[in-house]
Image (cartoon, rainbow, N blue to C red):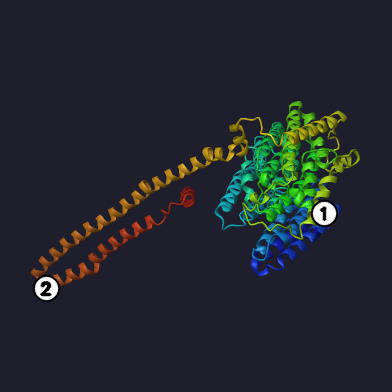
C-alpha cells in the first residue's frame, strides 16, 4: 500500500528531473512524455485517494519523513494531478520546437511533484523540503524566458517575496524543536507549550499568507504574470498559490489552539478578497485581472480556514482550481492567436474563436459566483462559516462576492462585444499572433470548463455532509435558505450592474483608479519599507568595510613595511660594525661575517617576509561579502568557546 504514495511523488519528480536535464535534446518527445507522465500520475492519484496509503522513513535523528493521503489530501492530490495533466496537454501545442520544451515540461512536472509532497507530508521537515523545491521551480518557470530582463526581474520579485514569507516555516520549525515537539509531526504542533505555540502559529500563518498572495504580499502575483500562460494556469490555480490556503486548512487545529490566529487569518482573507477584487475591477490587462481575482478568490479559502470551514474551503479550492486554470488557458490561447492580452484589444475575441469564447464565458460566469455554477455553491459554504464566526466577516465576504461578479462580467463584456471596425490595430502588441489556436487547445479547455460548471455538487446537502465527515468537520455549518437567496441576488445584481456600466467611465476619482490598477502600490511600499533600508544598510557596511576594516588592514601592512625598513637600517649598522671589527682581525671578521649572513640577515629577512605575509593574510578575508564575515565571526566565536572549555 505504501508503494502507491511513493510512486505518486517519485513519478513526476523523477521524470521531470530527467526531462529538465535533457533539455533541447529531448525537444520532440518532451510534450508527449510530459503528458504521459502526468496522465500516469493522475491515475496513481486516483488510486491513492481511494486506498488512502501512508508511509514514513527515517530522515534525521528522532525525526521521520511522513507521507499520508487522508480525507483532505485525497481531494488535493487528484486536483493537482488533473490540473497538471490539462495544462501540459495544452502546452504541448503552445510551445514550438524552437523552445526548450524539455526544460519547460520537466520543471512543471517537478513543480507538480513538489506540490504533491506538500499536500501529503505529515512532518514539518518534509513539508519544508517540498516547499523549497516548489519555490525554486516556480522561480525558474516564471522566468522561463530568461533572455528578457523584465521576465527575470519579475521572477526575482516573486521568489524573494515568497521566500521572505517562507522564513516563517523555519521559525515555526525552530520553535517546535525548542518547545519539545522533536518529531515535528504536524499533528503534534497544537500541543506545543506556550509561548512556543504562538511562535509556531505565527510562522505558519506568515508563510501561508505569503505563498497564497494575501495582503500584504499580494503584489508578487502581479509580477508572476510575466511567465508563460500555461505556467500561470498551473501555478496560480491548484498548486503554488493554493498551497498556503491548503496549509491553513490542514493546520486549523493549530490556529484554534492560540485563540488569536483564527480571527486574524479569517479577517486577512476577507479583506484580501474585497480589496484584491477591487484591484481586479481596475485592470485593463486580462492576465492581470485574472491574477488579482486569484488573490481575491484565495481570500475566500483563507477566510474559510480561519473561521473553521474546512469542507467549505476545500470545495472553494477545488472549484476555483478548475475555473481559474481554464480561464488562464483561454487567455493564453488568445495571446498566442492575437498577440495581445489587453482587454480593449480583445473585443470580439469570443465571437472570432467560438470554442474559446464558450469556455471563457462559462468560466467567467462561474468566477462571478452565479447560480447554479460551482463557485456560487462553494462561496455560500464559505460565507456560512464566516457568518457563524462573525456578522462582520459575513458582510465583508458578501461584499467581496459582489465585487467578484463585477470583475468577472467586466472581462466577459469585453471579449463578447462585436468586433471593432479595425480589430487588427490592437493586435500583436506583445508578440506576433498566429491567428489560430493549437490543436491541443480544445480538449483540456473543455474538460476544465465542464469541471468548473459541475463541481458545485460538492456543496449540495448530501455530498456536502459526506465531504464534512471526510475532512473531519461533521459539525461545520451549512448555509440557510435566506443566505443562499441573498448571495444569489447580490451576485445577479452586481453582474447586471457591471454589464450595464461596462461601456461607461467609472464614477471613481482617477487617483483611486491608479491606486487600484497599481495593485495598491504594495510593491512600492515594500521597496520603501524593506528594500531601500536593507540596501542602505548594505552600503553603510560596505563603507565601514572599506574605510575601517580595510583601513586597519592597510595600516597593519604599512606597519609591517616600516618594521622591515627599521630592521634594514639596524642591519646596515651591524654591517658597519662588522666591517670595523673586520679591520681589527681577519679571523674575527670572517667569523662575524658568517654570523651576520647566516643568522642576523636571515632573521631580518624572515621578519620582513613574515610582515608581508601577515599583510597578505589580513587582506584575504576582506571580501566585502557579509555572509563570509558572518562565517568568520562564527568560527572565531567557536574557537573562543573551545579555549574557554579547555582552560576550565
From the top left corner, tell me how far across and down residue 588 is, in percent: 14, 70
Looking at the image, is mark 2 or mark 1 nearer the viewer?
1
Kindly identify which numbered label has been placed on residue 341: none
Secondary structure under tag 2 reads helix
Question: Would you place residue 148 above or below residue 415 in this image?
Answer: below
Can residue 75 be spotted in the picture? yes
Residue 371 in the image, given as x and y percentages of width and height: 84, 38
- Residue at horizontal 83 percent and vertical 45 percent from the top: 453
Q: Is residue 63 visible?
A: no
Q: Nearer the viewer, residue 402 or 76?
A: 402
Q: Is residue 142 left or right of residue 618?
A: right
Crowdedness near tag 1: few (<14), some (14–19) or many (≥20) residues, C-alpha within 10 Å: some
Q: Of label 2 and label 1, which has the lower sequence position?
A: 1
Q: Nearer the viewer, residue 115 or 269?
A: 269
Image mark for residue 53:
1
Distance from the alpha carbon under mark 2 to that under mark 1 = 99 Å
Extreme residue toward the right, this view:
462
Tell me the residue that label 2 is attached to: 586
**x, y percent for residue 43:** 82, 58
**How busy is the neighbourhood of tag 2: few (under 14 within 10 Å), some, or many (20 plus)?**
few
Amino acid at each position: 500500500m505504501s508503494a502507491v504514495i511513493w510512486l505518486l511523488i517519485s513519478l513526476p519528480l523523477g521524470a521531470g528531473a530527467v526531462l529538465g536535464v535533457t533539455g533541447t535534446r529531448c525537444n520532440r518527445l518532451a510534450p508527449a512524455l510530459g503528458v504521459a507522465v502526468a496522465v500516469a500520475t493522475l491515475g496513481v492519484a486516483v488510486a491513492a485517494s481511494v486506498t488512502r496509503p501512508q508511509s514514513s522513513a527515517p530522515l534525521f535523528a528522532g525525526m521521520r519523513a511522513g507521507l499520508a493521503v487522508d480525507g483532505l489530501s485525497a481531494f488535493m492530490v487528484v486536483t493537482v494531478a488533473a490540473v497538471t495533466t490539462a495544462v501540459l496537454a495544452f502546452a504541448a501545442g503552445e510551445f514550438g520546437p524552437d523552445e526548450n520544451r524539455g526544460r519547460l515540461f520537466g520543471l512543471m512536472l517537478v513543480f507538480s511533484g513538489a506540490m504533491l509532497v506538500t499536500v501529503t507530508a505529515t512532518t514539518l521537515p518534509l513539508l519544508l523540503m517540498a516547499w523549497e523545491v516548489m519555490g525554486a521551480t516556480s522561480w525558474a518557470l516564471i522566468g522561463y524566458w530568461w533572455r528578457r530582463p523584465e521576465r527575470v526581474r519579475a521572477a526575482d520579485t516573486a521568489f524573494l517575496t515568497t521566500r521572505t514569507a517562507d522564513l516563517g516555516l523555519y521559525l515555526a520549525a525552530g520553535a517546535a524543536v525548542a518547545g519539545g515537539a522533536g518529531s515535528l509531526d504536524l499533528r503534534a504542533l497544537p500541543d506545543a507549550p506556550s509561548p512556543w505555540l504562538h511562535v509556531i502559529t505565527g510562522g505558519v500563518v506568515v508563510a501561508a499568507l505569503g505563498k497564497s498572495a494575501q495582503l500584504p504580499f499580494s503584489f508578487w502575483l502581479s509580477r508572476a504574470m510575466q511567465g508563460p500562460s500555461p505556467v500561470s494556469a498551473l501555478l496560480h490555480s491548484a498548486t503554488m498559490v493554493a498551497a498556503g490556503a491548503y496549509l491553513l486548512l490542514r493546520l486549523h487545529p493549530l490556529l484554534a489552539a492560540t485563540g488569536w490566529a483564527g480571527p486574524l487569518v479569517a479577517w486577512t482573507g476577507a479583506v484580501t478578497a474585497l480589496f484584491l477584487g477591487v484591484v481586479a475591477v481596475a485592470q485593463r490587462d486580462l492576465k492581470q485581472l485574472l491574477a488579482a481575482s486569484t488573490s481575491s478568490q484565495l481570500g475566500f479559502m483563507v477566510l474559510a480556514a480561519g473561521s473553521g470551514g474546512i469542507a467549505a474551503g476545500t470545495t472553494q479550492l477545488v472549484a476555483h482550481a478548475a475555473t481559474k486554470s481554464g480561464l488562464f488557458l483561454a487567455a493564453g490561447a488568445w495571446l498566442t492567436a492575437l498577440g495581445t492580452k489587453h482587454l480593449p484589444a480583445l473585443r470580439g475575441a469570443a465571437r472570432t474563436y467560438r470554442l474559446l469564447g464558450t469556455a471563457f464565458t462559462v468560466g467567467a460566469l462561474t468566477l462571478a459566483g452565479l447560480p447554479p455554477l460551482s463557485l456560487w455553491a462553494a462561496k455560500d459554504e464559505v460565507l456560512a462559516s464566516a457568518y457563524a464566526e462573525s456578522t462582520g466577516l459575513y458582510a465583508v465576504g458578501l461584499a467581496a462576492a459582489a465585487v467578484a461578479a463585477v470583475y468577472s462580467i467586466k472581462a466577459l463584456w469585453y471579449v463578447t462585444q462585436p468586433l471593432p471596425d479595425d480589430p487588427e490595430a490592437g493586435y500583436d502588441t506583445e508578440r506576433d499572433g498566429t491567428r489560430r489556436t493549437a490543436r491541443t487547445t480544445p480538449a483540456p479547455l473543455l474538460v476544465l470548463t465542464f469541471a468548473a460548471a459541475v463541481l458545485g455538487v460538492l456543496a449540495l446537502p448530501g455530498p456536502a455532509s459526506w465531504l464534512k465527515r471526510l475532512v473531519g468537520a461533521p459539525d461545520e455549518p451549512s448555509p440557510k435558505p435566506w443566505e443562499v437567496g441573498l448571495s444569489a441576488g447580490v451576485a445577479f445584481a452586481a453582474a447586471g450592474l457591471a454589464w450595464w456600466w461596462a461601456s461607461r467611465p467609472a464614477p471613481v476619482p482617477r487617483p483611486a483608479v491608479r491606486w487600484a490598477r497599481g495593485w495598491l502600490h504594495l510593491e512600492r511600499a515594500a521597496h520603501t519599507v524593506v528594500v531601500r533600508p536593507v540596501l542602505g544598510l548594505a552600503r553603510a557596511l560596505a563603507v565601514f568595510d572599506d574605510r575601517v576594516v580595510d583601513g586597519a588592514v592597510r595600516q597593519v601592512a604599512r606597519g609591517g613595511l616600516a618594521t622591515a625598513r627599521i630592521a634594514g637600517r639596524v642591519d646596515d649598522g651591524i654591517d658597519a660594525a662588522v666591517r670595523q671589527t673586520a679591520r681589527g682581525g681577519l679571523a674575527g671578521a670572517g667569523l662575524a661575517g658568517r654570523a651576520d649572513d647566516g643568522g642576523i640577515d636571515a632573521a631580518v629577512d624572515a621578519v620582513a617576509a613574515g610582515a608581508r605575509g601577515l599583510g597578505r593574510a589580513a587582506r584575504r578575508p576582506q571580501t566585502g561579502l557579509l555572509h563570509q564575515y558572518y562565517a568568520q565571526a562564527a568560527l572565531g566565536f567557536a574557537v573562543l568557546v573551545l579555549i574557554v572549555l579547555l582552560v576550565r
